[in-house]
């Protein structure tokens, strides 16, 4: 038996994943356990939990893989430093910080309070973008595909194209920082009042409300180059090897201002986070998303020229841009995408482990991701004890009864907390830590926002649809099990699915297959039987916090908010029955 622990640490999305004999048996982001969104410290709690789920101890770990390699792309770092001597100090600071990785045994022993003598593993550093690529390709069922990773930056790279074949990933092209589609997206988010790490998805949702006003502005920022694209540095504060990012002592990510005064000179003052969103801000979001998609598609077309296949493995924070992913399937020659749910930096933990197992050790034990449920689960006994501890009235139901009463509630307009099975890996709730509601109930978006989510009114809610019914409702038929593609909803369904139709008649769907999540599938089937809609509205189970992990967090969210029903394990709880 071989045990590989993968970690992403001291970087946003700290996480751990564990492979036993090549198979991923657990993967958890630290934010779910320590409740600090995008936590960027050491993933102590997720390491402990992954080991527990796998039933192994620290002394059983054979290999540790870290999705970061400070020695990668050194020639580019040196070239940059020689051209920008004032940034040398910053590079030296980053280098000295990365010293912690030179002795992973001491790091893990001290962070996890373990006797170092018990740790006998061999450690590997995997370049950031190789780990991203591995997280997608080695989760796919394929033995060959093109690979592309696009993000802000990692190990001095913001985009990598590769050929994935058998147990090899061969990098073919890299785009080096400061040129970065992720940096551009984040800078514009900051300018229009979304300064927090991870706010990019909100701006993607805002974009369809805008008009095509700023095409020239964005054409001047982003230009084609022989590597794919380059940023016009006039629009950005000087790049200095991560100078724009800071990790607080509490492990929170702070992204400092990235854009230069040229933005203000051309567009006027930036928007304060609390200020009203104006048409200008929507137009800027529109221009950003459009130019992003243009280069995203261009990169994919370039990739296809060098790796001519119809399959592409994709990762990196930009691969969470579900609108661009939807378009990629019909605006490029690629016909199948494999994007695992933790496409952002949390996925580096899984990717680094998969890279070590497949590429470095050549274990020859391919794994295929069947579903996203790699996290914590809780027994009915634990859940029942928690409900009693919180003094919550409940009814214990059979599986069929639970499905029946829950679908009745959704049909009648109730907002349902749905807590079942193992927690999802990645940023999306996929039917195990979800809030469910009727997808076509009048004003359901406003009800959810007023009662629980408190989100901007423009942000759409997502539909979970039975896989077999997808093409009846959506114009595209490529499955999206991890909610990573946006497709047009067919005209005849738009009104019936008003709560999950965005302003541009699209939906960021989750396709649900029975073998991936039988309980959730049967729930949606029953809802279809009662309403003629093979769809439920699915939003994450949380209220301005990381998605709930433990029963106590679900119960507290249920009692704190105006949620009507909590269906947790076999237990059904309803307020004011
Ligand atoms: Fe990344």
Image (tube, grey):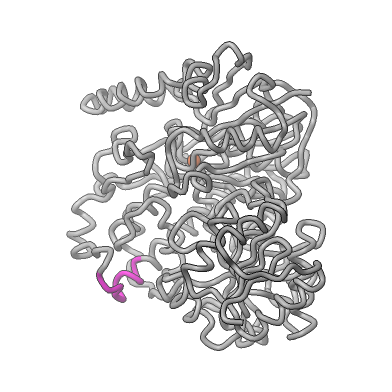
Residue 85 visible (yes or no): yes
Residue 121: x, y in percent?
Answer: 63, 17
Q: For the view shown, which residue lies furthest in the top direction? A: 117
Residue 549: x, y in percent?
Answer: 57, 52
**140 above or below 393?**
above
Q: Residue at x 71, y 55 (%)?
A: 421
Residue 350 visible (yes or no): no
Magenta segment range? 275-284
Q: Residue at x 60, y 16 (%)?
A: 119
Q: Residue at x 72, y 52 (%)?
A: 379
Q: Is residue 126 left or right of residue 61?
A: left
Q: Is residue 9 left or right of residue 6?
A: left
Q: Could you tell me how many numbered marks the image carries?
A: 0
Q: Is residue 200 left or right of residue 460?
A: left
**319 above or below 207?**
above
Give the quadrant of the N terminus: top right
Residue 503: x, y in percent?
Answer: 49, 79
Where residue 385 sits, quadrant-wise, is: bottom right
**366 above or below 305?**
above
Instruction: Determine the main secondary structure of the stretch shown in magenta.
Output: helix
Q: Is residue 9 left or right of residue 254?
A: right
Of 276 and 186, the residue lying toward us: 276
Tell whether position 567 is magenta: no
**398 above or below 256?**
below
Residue 445: x, y in percent?
Answer: 51, 79
């Amino acid at each position: 038996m071989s045990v590989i622990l993968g970690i992403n640490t001291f970087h946003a999305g700290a996480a751990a994943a564990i492979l036993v004999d090549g198979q991923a048996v657990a993967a958890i982001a630290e934010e779910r356990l320590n409740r600090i969104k995008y936590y960027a410290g050491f993933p102590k709690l997720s390491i402990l939990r992954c080991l527990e789920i796998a039933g192994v101890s620290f002394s059983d770990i054979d290999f540790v893989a870290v999705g970061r390699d400070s020695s990668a792309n050194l020639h580019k770092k040196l070239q940059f430093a020689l051209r920008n001597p004032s940034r040398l100090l910053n590079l030296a600071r980053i280098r000295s910080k990365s010293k912690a990785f030179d002795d992973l045994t001491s790091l893990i022993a001290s962070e996890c309070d373990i006797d170092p003598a018990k740790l006998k593993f061999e450690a590997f550093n995997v370049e950031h973008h190789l780990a991203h690529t591995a997280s997608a390709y080695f989760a796919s069922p394929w033995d060959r595909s093109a690979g592309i990773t696009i993000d802000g930056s990692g190990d001095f790279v913001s985009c990598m194209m590769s050929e994935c074949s058998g147990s090899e990933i061969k990098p073919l092209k890299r785009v080096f920082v400061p040129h970065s589609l992720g940096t551009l997206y984040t800078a514009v988010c900051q300018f229009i009042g979304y300064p927090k790490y991870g706010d990019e998805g909100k701006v993607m949702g805002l974009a369809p409300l805008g008009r095509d006003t700023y095409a020239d502005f964005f054409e001047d920022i982003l230009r084609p180059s022989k590597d794919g694209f380059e940023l016009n540095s006039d629009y950005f504060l000087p790049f200095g090897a991560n100078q724009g990012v800071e990790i607080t002592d509490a492990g929170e990510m702070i992204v400092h201002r990235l854009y230069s005064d040229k933005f203000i000179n051309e567009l006027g003052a930036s928007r304060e986070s609390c200020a009203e969103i104006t048409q200008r801000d929507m137009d800027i979001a529109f221009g950003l998303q459009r130019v992003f998609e243009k280069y995203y598609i261009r990169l994919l077309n370039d990739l296809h020229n060098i790796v001519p296949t119809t399959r592409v493995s994709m990762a990196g924070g930009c691969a969470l841009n579900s609108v661009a992913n939807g378009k990629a399937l019909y605006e490029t020659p690629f016909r199948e995408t494999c994007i695992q749910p933790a496409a952002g930096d949390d996925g580096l933990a899984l990717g680094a482990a998969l890279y070590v197992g497949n590429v470095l050790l050549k274990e020859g034990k391919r794994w295929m991701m069947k579903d996203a449920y790699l996290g914590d689960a809780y027994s009915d006994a634990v859940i029942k004890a928690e409900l009693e501890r919180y003094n919550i009235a409940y009814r214990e139901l059979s599986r069929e009864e639970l499905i029946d009463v829950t679908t009745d509630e959704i049909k009648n307009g109730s907002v349902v907390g749905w807590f079942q099975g193992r927690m999802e890996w990645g940023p999306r709730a996929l039917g195990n830590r979800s809030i469910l509601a009727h997808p076509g109930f009048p004003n359901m978006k406003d009800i959810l926002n007023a009662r629980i989510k408190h989100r901007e009114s423009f942000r759409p809610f997502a539909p979970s649809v039975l896989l077999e019914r997808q093409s009846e409702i959506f114009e595209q038929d490529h499955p999206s099990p991890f909610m990573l593609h946006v497709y047009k909803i067919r005209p005849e369904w738009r009104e019936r699915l008003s709560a999950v139709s965005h302003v541009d008649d699209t939906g960021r769907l989750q396709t649900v297959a029975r073998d991936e999540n039988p309980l959730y599938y049967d729930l949606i089937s029953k809802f279809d039987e009662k309403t003629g809609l093979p769809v439920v509205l699915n939003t994450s189970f949380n209220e301005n916090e990381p998605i709930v992990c433990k029963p106590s967090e679900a119960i507290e969210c249920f009692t704190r908010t105006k949620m009507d029903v909590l269906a947790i394990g076999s237990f059904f709880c309803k307020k004011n029955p």
